[in-house]
Structures are given as C-alpha cells and as structure tokens.
Amino acid sequence: MHIGLIGLGKMGFNMRERLRRGGVEVTGYDRNPDVTDVASVDDLLTKVPAPRIIWVMVPAGDITGATINELADKLDRGDMVIDGGNSRFTEDQKHAELLTAKGIHFVDCGVSGGVWGLQNGYGLMAGGTAGDIERALPIFDALRPEGERADSFVHVGGVGAGHYAKMVHNGIEYGLMQAYAEGYQLLASKDIITDLPGTFAAWQKGTVVRSWLLDLLVKALNEDPGLEKLGDYVEDSGEGRWTVEEAIANAVPAPVITAALFARFASREDSSPAMKMVSALRHQFGGHATQPAK
Amino acid sequence: MHIGLIGLGKMGFNMRERLRRGGVEVTGYDRNPDVTDVASVDDLLTKVPAPRIIWVMVPAGDITGATINELADKLDRGDMVIDGGNSRFTEDQKHAELLTAKGIHFVDCGVSGGVWGLQNGYGLMAGGTAGDIERALPIFDALRPEGERADSFVHVGGVGAGHYAKMVHNGIEYGLMQAYAEGYQLLASKDIITDLPGTFAAWQKGTVVRSWLLDLLVKALNEDPGLEKLGDYVEDSGEGRWTVEEAIANAVPAPVITAALFARFASREDSSPAMKMVSALRHQFGGHATQPAK
Amino acid sequence: MHIGLIGLGKMGFNMRERLRRGGVEVTGYDRNPDVTDVASVDDLLTKVPAPRIIWVMVPAGDITGATINELADKLDRGDMVIDGGNSRFTEDQKHAELLTAKGIHFVDCGVSGGVWGLQNGYGLMAGGTAGDIERALPIFDALRPEGERADSFVHVGGVGAGHYAKMVHNGIEYGLMQAYAEGYQLLASKDIITDLPGTFAAWQKGTVVRSWLLDLLVKALNEDPGLEKLGDYVEDSGEGRWTVEEAIANAVPAPVITAALFARFASREDSSPAMKMVSALRHQFGGHATQPAK
Amino acid sequence: MHIGLIGLGKMGFNMRERLRRGGVEVTGYDRNPDVTDVASVDDLLTKVPAPRIIWVMVPAGDITGATINELADKLDRGDMVIDGGNSRFTEDQKHAELLTAKGIHFVDCGVSGGVWGLQNGYGLMAGGTAGDIERALPIFDALRPEGERADSFVHVGGVGAGHYAKMVHNGIEYGLMQAYAEGYQLLASKDIITDLPGTFAAWQKGTVVRSWLLDLLVKALNEDPGLEKLGDYVEDSGEGRWTVEEAIANAVPAPVITAALFARFASREDSSPAMKMVSALRHQFGGHATQPAK
C-alpha cells in the first residue's frame, strides 16, 4: 500500500516513520521543506497511485478545512481522504458531504498516543462506512501497537464517530491529569511526606491508580523533582471545550472534566476579575482588608 | 437592661452603639484602651448588675475559648454568657457544659450584617433553651432591624444551632458572591458590553437577582469601575471551610459553596503546583510547550 | 405611545397590563384567542400607528425567528422591532441585519422579574443604537419599577448586548438559587435545627444573604415547610447553558454557574450512567458490593 | 520470617496467601472461624515467634483502634505492629504513642491493589522510622509485585505518612473513576457511537488514557455491555472524604476529587432537598411548572 500524508508536524512526522516501518509506503507533504517528501500537494497526488488514500494530519479548524477543500478539488472519484487530526466531529459531516458529492470517500480517525506513538503505536478510533474502514485497515494496522487489533483500534460508527470518541478521550484525559495533579499538590503541601517522587514511583505497579499518565508523571518528577523549572500556565486545545459543550448539549453532568478545563483557564489569568469582585464585596460588607492590584 | 460586652472590634464596637441606641445599657471591655469602657474583665463584672448577661464578641477559636474559660471562673450561678462570635458550632456544646456545670447559662448567637449592622440592624440566629432565649430577647430586639422580629431573629434550636445556622449562612454567602463574581467576569470579558457598571446598577430593582450583595457590588463599581485598585487575593475565614466539612459529614453535595471556597484558595497561590504538574504531563506525552517558572 | 405586542404568555400578558397602567397603549396578539386583542399579526399591524414599534415576547429560538422573519416582510421602513424574549445574543445580529436591510430598526431587551413584574416592575437591559433606545424609552419607563431609571434600566451596548447581559443575569440566578438550595439541604440534614423555615425567615432583614430570591424561598417554605409536595426535577432553559458556553468561549472559569447547571441535569436523570460505571469499577477492583438496577 | 496477621477479610485473606507464596510464614486470626488459623488473638501471640511482627488488616476506625489497644496490652517490648488498613493518618500518631510508650514499634502502611493484589501484588506506602521499615522489608517484598522495589514500595516518611499517601491515592482514584465515568456517559448519550464497548477496548493500548482502571472498565463492559444490571448507587469509604478535608485544611483547590465525592453523595439520594428548593424557587419567581414528589 502507498498513501499520501499531508502534515508532518509533531504527530505526522512520527506517523510517517511508523507507517514506513510497518510496510506502508508513504509520500509526505508539509509546508516545511526540511521534512517534506514532495514540493506540493499537486506533486503528492501524482506520486500516490490511484485509487489514492490521503491521510490529512494538519491542525484542526481552518487549516484542515482548507486542505480538505483543496483535496475535494484535486482528487478523483474513488479516492479516499482520512482526517486524522483533532477536528471537531461536527466538521466531519460537512467534509464528508463535500467529498462524497464528488465520489471521494471520507473517514475520520481520532489518533492518540502523542510523541510516544512512533515507539508504542497509536490508539485509533475511526468513523465511516464499513467498506471504507476495511479499505484503510492496513494503515490502521501499521499505526497501532502490535497485538490484538481490538485493543487499539475501533470502528466507532459512521462519519464523525471517530472524532467524537477522540474528543471524549481527550476530555477524560483532562480529568485524569487534573486528578493526579490535585493529588500531587496534596502530597506536596504536607511536610510529613519526605519522598514525594518515590511515592508516585511506587504507584506504578500494583496500585489501583497505575496508568501510562502516572508513568509519565514519574518520569517528569525524575527530571525535575519539584517541578521547579516549570510555570503553571496550561493551554487547552479545542477538545476539552468541545467535550463540555457536548455535555451541555446532551444534558450530561460532567463536573470533573469541566473542573479540569476551568483550572486551565484560571492558570492563564494574570489576575482574576471574579476574585477581585469577591474581594470588593467582602470589603463592602465586612470591612475586610483587600490587597492592592499588582 | 444592663449587659457586659467583651470585644469591641469591627463588630462589637458597632453593636455596643446599636444596643445603647436601642435602650440597652452596655459596659464594654476590649484590650484596646481607646475603645474600652473598663480596665479589665474583673472591672466589667463589677459594673454589670447580677444576674449578669455577658455578650462575648471576640475572634473565634482560642480567644473565644479563653474568654469563656475566664468567665466560667468568674461568673456566678444564674449569670449568662452569649457567644455572638463566629465560633464553630461544635465548640458550643463544650462551652455550654463548662458553664452549665457552674449554673451559668449559655446561648450561642450567629450575627450577620457586617459593618452595616449599626445602621441597618443585624440578622440574628440563636441557639439555647427557650428560657435563656426569652431572657435575652431585649438584647436581640435592640440589635436587630426594626419591624417584625421573625424577619431578623430566630431561635434556631438548642445550644449550637445558632452557630450552625450562621455557618450555613456564610457558606451560602460564599456561593452568592462567587456567582455574582463569575457573572462580573463574563460581562467584563465581552467587548459588546459598553456599560458594565450600569448593567449591575440596573439589576437593583425588578430583576430576579436583586439583593443586598448586589447593591454592594454596585457601590463597589461606583467607587472603582474596573476594580483596578484591587488585587485578586481573597481570604477565607473558618466558616466556609466548616460548611464544606459539614457537607461531607452529612453527605450533602455542595458543589457551589465548595467551588467558591476553592476559588479563594486558588486566588492566594503564587503559582499552582497542580497546574505545574498538568503542564509537565502535557509536555511528557504530547511534547507541548511549557512556560518557565516565574 | 401605542405599540404592538406579540406574545401574551406568562410574561407578555402581564407586560401588556403593566404597559397600559403606565400609559402606553398596547395592541396585543397571541395565538390564544382568549387573550389576544386582534385576530392576526396582519390585523395588529393595521391597528398600531406608524412608525410602529412591535415588541416581540415569544419563546426564544424558532418561534422568535419566525416572528421576526414575518415582521421583516410586513413592517415598513422606520418601524422598530424589540425582541424582549430570551433569545441567544448571537441571534440578535442576524435579526438586526435582516431588519436593517429593510430600514427596520431593531433593539434587543432582556427582561427580568418573572410573574412579579406586573406588580413590581421589570428589570430591563437593552442593546441597540442610542437613537433606537431613546425612541423606546417610554416603553421601558412604563415596564420598569418606579424610581430612578438607572436602578432598573440600562442601555448595555449595541445590538445583542441586552440579551448577553440577560443571559449572564440568568447564569448568576442559577448560581444564587443553587447556593441557597445547598444551604437549605445542609440545614435540613441537621437535627439540631428545630426551626428551619424560621431560620430563612430571619435572614430577610439585616443579614448579608438577604435578597429577593430569599424572600421567595421564605414564601415557598411558608406554603410547604418541608417541600414535601415537590419533586426534585428541575428544568433548565437555554440561558444557563449559553452562559457556560460563553464562559468556555471566553476562557472564563465559571465553576459555580456550571455546578448549578449540572445539578439540574442530574436532577432529571432516572439513573446515572456515569455512576453505574463508578459502581462497576469499584466492584471490579475491590469486590465492593453493587446495587441492582431499579 | 513468621508474622501474625489479624483480619482475614477481602484484603487480609488474599494477603495471607500472597505472603505465604512469597515465603513468609503467616499465622492469621479472624473472628470468622472458617478462615482463621487460630482461635484468638492470645493464641496468635503464642504462635508468632518473638520479637513479633503483627500486621493489622481490619476495618479502619473503632475496630482498628480496639485491635491496637488490645495489642498494646498484650505485646512485648520489641514487638512491632503494622497497620495495613485504611486508617486515617491522624490516628497513626495516637497509635504510635500508645505503642511506643511500651517499647512496641509501629509502622503504618497503605495497601492498594484490591482483590487483584493476590495475583498482581500490592502497591505499598509505608510510614515509620528507617529501622522499623528495614525490619519489615521482607513482608513488603512478598506482598508487592515482582520487579523493582521502587515501582511498588515506598517509605513515604515518618509515622502517618504511609496512610496519608494512601488517602491521597484513593482521592486520585475517585477522580480517575469519575473522569472515565463522565466519558462513558458522554459516549453512551450519543447515537452515532455504535460500538461503545469497543471504543473503550481500543483505548487499552496506545492511547494517553490507558490505565489499569480502563482495563477493568473494559472488563465490566464485556460482562454487561450496557451496565443494565447495575444500579447507580455508589458508596464512599472514608478516604475520599478525608482527602477533601485535607484539601481544605491545606488550602489546596481540589475540584476534581471533590466533584467525584459529591457525585457519590448525590447518587445515594432518593430525592434531593436542594433541587426541590431550586424547583420551588423557579415556581415562585417564574411560575415554572414543578413536578410532584414521587
């Protein structure tokens, strides 16, 4: 199998390598001349044999939209586009309609595994028709870890279902990280804990909280035991937000995932207007002291 | 009626004045010679006619405990102590036992109203026996606003019930303030709102959210429309914490009050260990950029 | 002044009455023949003198959209539409564009006060141009409580700002109600509280938590002291959801308002899939007993 | 090595077996005659060679307290007690003082691993002096998984530190479970997800959220794909509550762990007094329909 891969950033670059190691021929395109295999998307399309499969691995939103628009113009009937980026699942239907109208197939695929995917393989969640998924299986098999397919790959449902599952996956991820982080702060706040990194390390085997994220947490503490080099500013990408929006849309209480999202928002504030107001109110009714603005 | 009042701080000072205006004779004692009426507690006890009523209005915890211990030693059978401070309700039973063993009566009374109580009158929640409450009614009547007694005074239950009610009152207060504060930040974050102070002002009459705290919020914005002079550091006193602890003890979900408490905790952190850990984890799995420690 | 009012439901019916008491002539239309003044919108438009002002007070969403579309077709240059319903602020711009293209003016106005507005007057938050707001002032003045205009009316900003402010108002309302509700449950869970309704009643004057909602809470407890007739099922209308969505869109932490929203979602679940999963997990790792499905 | 083990319940029974497999001789006592090795604690103490090590594995609280009191009476100078139960860390200092006064050594040890510990080994967190820990190492080594000691055992700090770490571990566990559970509900609420169990299964290898709890979740869904047999009632043991209490005591914001705890509280309510109040308030101000009590 020989496919095209558009987007060779942090994720796509490693995926190209893993695909090649797994026996899938890949022609990759990226705007960055240092990593691209070809000079242009047009060039890519001439290199990939028909019927083509083009994996899109570019930032979600406008860039993915523009890429899929371009492919809709340039691909042929029978070709297939797989959006492996973190697109919002609501975009998939639009992209599928655009492509399907021209006889081009579309699959959305959530990809998890981060920078470790090259080494460990990626967890994959795909949405699309059974026939389209079947056709792309060799790609999925090369990307995912060795072993049982069902442990790392799922055909979640129709178009959009793969990205929906990936969105929920990331929402869960927010919650898991925040749970560990709260535990970290609780241990760090207590003098009687004299071996904090060792405590997390000892949770790696045997405990109920063992996980891959815990292993990474141990690794982070090994590198910087007090996290002294790090700021507490945490970005969020779209998927945490979308997860909460879906919780709202479906009337699902999601206090843990939402708390994790809000903690990130708060981490990025230089000062909190809300807490200024609480300070103002306490002063107004109780004469409580306030602190001046920094 | 002539009572003793120990503690002439922000609250006690004003209460002495309101009591006097209401026809209750008050001998006040405070360690601060500028405000005290007498030189010592002993002095106070000679001035107040027997059977004495001594209102204690000192900081909760050790100072209240020491004051009540002292009174247990110095008062006579038939005297009464009223703890009007913000003591934890669990302390009241201990104080009552200590005093009752010596024939001294005890009432706990939650007092709300802040620095405005002198002018507006105080909301009062009392715990104790019916007889003791009855005996102290002239004091309560002088402290509370004019009008129906039931609108500003309640005999909540036995010893401790007054402080329990006040604790819950303050927990609610945390939640109310945070709700307004979140709304403030939402309005402040939106360019299309060109008259933010005017919006809050317009809520004072007619809307569902009108309240005394809203009136104070409007006052605060009048004094400093962008809250630019204020820091976002917010203290908490014991009662918010105790409310959440009671929620836990009684298996009552209290997400709003707890969120308000945690927001105060977060407001006081120079940097968040938890969010450093989240940043570390994102870097570990995804290679996401971190920010250096400040 | 003589205006048209479309929508004579719980809100519109009372508003018609208050407007008339305030000296504004009103021709009202509703699909319900028992309350309408005219047989049709067409009929209404012949009755209201030009340049017309038509106040739309129908359910947000499709019905408001359809009504404004109809008015866009039937009104004349120089007429004005005021949307006083609970439309999402993002709809206002669309409605304004549609109308403005035909020379019809548009104002959005958030209206608070519920069923008590007839008696007490409504709190009003308007968005639009200064000229349009000026033109509609006699209506606002009739609807709002007597007294200072600034205490119950605000020109918040351009089109959409009125509904944005109303949305935030309702978000705050969710938080305030939940704070009182948590306090209620904390008091109700404690045996030592022997006069729960009296406790809330005593908060009405003097305390920091006094508010109109508290007065209503006291009224509710007077009518049904243990709330024994009531189920715990609570609907939410759009505005709580939109407030949280705006919090997300603007990266504003809003844990209190969100907790209030999620509590409503949870109140409507017959059983919680999430908690079934927690039960399943506890059983899996710890052999903890589960309860069978009801 | 030959030790005594008091308590052969769900945890202790398996631990006796794992210790024996690991070459530690164990005399176990339990009130249940079907599982006990000896007829009484006195009997146990005659069987275990001096200086004795007695591992206590009974329910936290009164039963642990009574057991340690009994041991304080019956053990000899130089003997050692290890409390492996889920005692609150604040109890450890009391127990240590009681025992140390008689020359008896004390170690607290958090044990994680649930019913799987027999097979997988237990994660262990110990508090005590370096000498005491050293002496008990053969026990810890038999209980923990094979492999690096540091991956499953830690000497956290002085007396109490082991249980503190276990408490935080369990707090994190609450958060992790709730995060997965929210994700489960989000997937279950969406029609486009046609293979929900398969989605979780596919997360087991490769994804960021892979963990032991996720493996158990997959196992639970294999056994009952829709969790249809399960109720949504979830108990909590002390440790989640203590974690939140410690968060409060140390001013650590812990919204995720707390949300997980409150979700359990709510799961156990037949009806929510708080939500009844919200329903009552909505009815009062807006005339919104209520539902009758069930």
Image (tube, coloured by chain):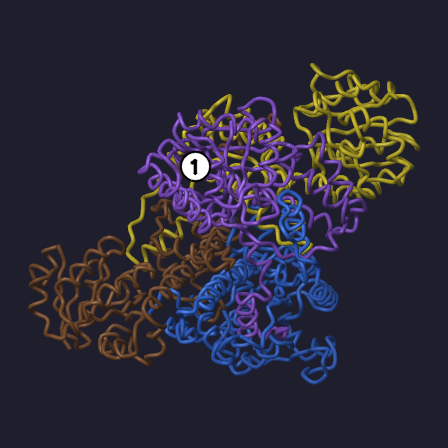
Chain colours: A purple, B blue, C brown, D yellow
Q: Residue at x 82, y 31 (%)?
A: D71
The image quarter containing residue A266 is bottom right
Residue at the far top in the pictured view: D34
Q: Is residue A128 above or below residue D259?
A: above
Residue at the far bottom in the pictured view: B34
Q: Is residue D189 visible?
A: yes
Q: Is residue B51 visible?
A: no
Quadrant (top left/top right/bottom left/bottom right) for the C terminus of chain A: bottom right
Where residue D253 appears, as percent x and y from the top left, is: 62, 54
C30 or B30: nearer the viewer: C30
Dot 1 corresponds to which residue? A81
**Type of amino acid at the residue the image marks with label 1:** Val
D43 or C194: nearer the viewer: D43
Where residue C226 appears, as percent x and y from the top left, is: 40, 49
Where residue A186 appears, as percent x and y from the top left, is: 69, 49
Horizontally, residue B116 falls left or right of residue C168, namely: right
